[in-house]
Image (cartoon, rainbow, N blue to C red):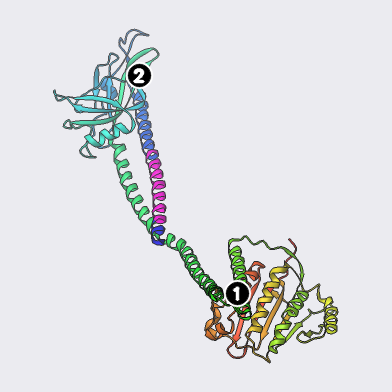
Amino acid sequence: MFQTTRRRLALWYTTVTAVLLLLFATGFYLYVRETLIERMDDTLNHVVEVVGRSLVIEPVNPHSEGGALRVNVEASFRDNAATGEDDHIDLEWFSPTGELLWSTLSEPLQIPLHLNNNGETVRMVRGSGGALREAGTQEGEEAENNDRQQLTTNNQQPTTASPDSLILRQVTQRIEVGRQVLGYLRVSHPWFEVTKPVRQLVWDLLLGIGLMVATVAAIGWFLSGLAMEPVSESYQRLKQFTADASHELRNPIAIIQTNVQVALADPDPDPKTQQQHLKVVERLTRRLGRLVDDLLFLARQDSGIVQARCVNVSVDSLLRDVLEEQQMLAEEKGIQLALSLIEPIAKNGASSAASQSGVTGVSPSTTTTIATTLSSQETWSTLYADRDQLARLFTNLVGNALQYTPSGGTVLVKLQPTKRSGNASLQISINDTGIGIAPDALPRLFDRFYRVDQARTQTAAAGSGLGLAIARAIVENHQGHIHIDSTLGQGTTVTVVLPQRDEG
């Protein structure tokens, strides 16, 4: 599937580039061709102007003043011999009546006079009598096509009498003095002086376009591969996530179905047995509810649907609430749960003492004293964040620490100000003396549904494997950072750094 999409992307890249190159090449070809024609016409008009100034004009009757004038052909054109060169410009001089009087051509052209100062393209073909006759006056592309079909070589000379066809660019002007017409001057230039460089340009453009299209095809294939990599990785992650979610849902659903079927199949149900089945169903239903809630949160987070409802949150107060909620679980497992607050350095340079308060097993009066003592910390420990998300974050992390810490262990939650990238931040670390995590498992801890090993899986039978994934999503949603350090058999430290952003 991805290879097909990659081929389509590469094909689209190549096609679009080829079309753009063809449009550019066509425009460049037309520009160069028109430029060559304009230069040729300018040259012909310049020749007409030079020749017109060099004409020897004399009166028909030298003894009469103000009489008719004529052009002395012998004196005017005595040095204008045919050179036989490829770029030779041929001249023809006609009388006022249109009679050819002088020409550099080796054989006359059977072409009637067409007065044209802007230039015209004339194609000549050899008639049945052997003379070159006009096949038609053409302009632009048609003349060039005929030139390609008729000319056998690019170096054919216009003064040669042998060609069966010939294409010329001509300018014809009337030479007159006052109102008296002295004659007509026609200047001809071989058309292949345009087609020869234009043909070379066409081949060069085709070669360049071919190389560019091949290069773009290779680059397009490479870029499409790069573009498809994240899509392929996301698809693989989605497949794995779907498979893991299905597995996590299938097991409790199967157990619920089994308990319900057993309860329904009993013809003489025992109330205690029925109650036991209902307790199992209720426990698994709560587990399924937590799992679905976690999946919905991650899905909304990935799609950007979750909008943080940020307010000013006193983190120290929030941590005390979380620890008090986890107090019962800590007492049941015999774990010491403690909160340590490290105040920032005072403005006068004196360092405030750290305030450390044990939460597990404290009396109500002691709890009140702690709240009064910590109320002074609310200024430096305030974050502009989503309180519900932070509560979920710290509940997950503290719950994990309690879950993987054996009886008699310690879980210490520490809050202190810090600097990260030059910005004021709060650092919250949760340190436990639990079973620890192997080094090779640390990189995958935040993967969804990932469990370190069988021992932890059995210990965390009620977990869904989404707690740390949700924790990372919440931290990233607050532009923070989360890191885990652990030593197998000694304990784990989870460090969360949250920037103290301004409101809005």
Q: Residue farthest to the left? A: 129
- Image x and y of residue 42, in percent: 38, 31
The C terminus sits in image quarter: bottom right
Residue type indicated by callout 2: Ile
Q: Looking at the image, is 372 positioned above or below residue 21?
A: below
Could you tell me residue 64's position as x and y percent? 34, 7
Q: Which residues are magenta?
A: 8-30
The residue closer to the viewer here, 330 or 414, is 330
Of residues 112 and 127, the one drawn nearer to the viewer in this rendering: 127
Residue at 33% across, 16% down:
182
Residue contact between numbered discs 1 and 2, judged by CB atoms under 8 Å: no
Q: Residues within 10 Å of mark 1 (few under 14, many from 20)?
A: many
The kind of secondary structure element at disc 1 is helix
Q: Label 1: which residue?
A: 281
Q: Give the Cα distance between marks 1 and 2.
A: 114 Å
The answer to which image quadrant residue 198 occupies is top left
Instruction: Specify whether residue 84 is in view.
Output: no
Residue where numbered disc 2 is placed: 175
Compared across the picture, whether 40 is left or right of 322 comes to left
Mark 2 neighbour class, 10 Å CA radius: few under 14, some 14 to 19, many 20 or more: many
User: Callout 1, which amino acid?
Assistant: Val
Residue drawn at 70 percent across, 90 percent down: 334
In the image, residue 237 above or below residue 217: below
Q: Secondary structure at mark 2?
A: strand
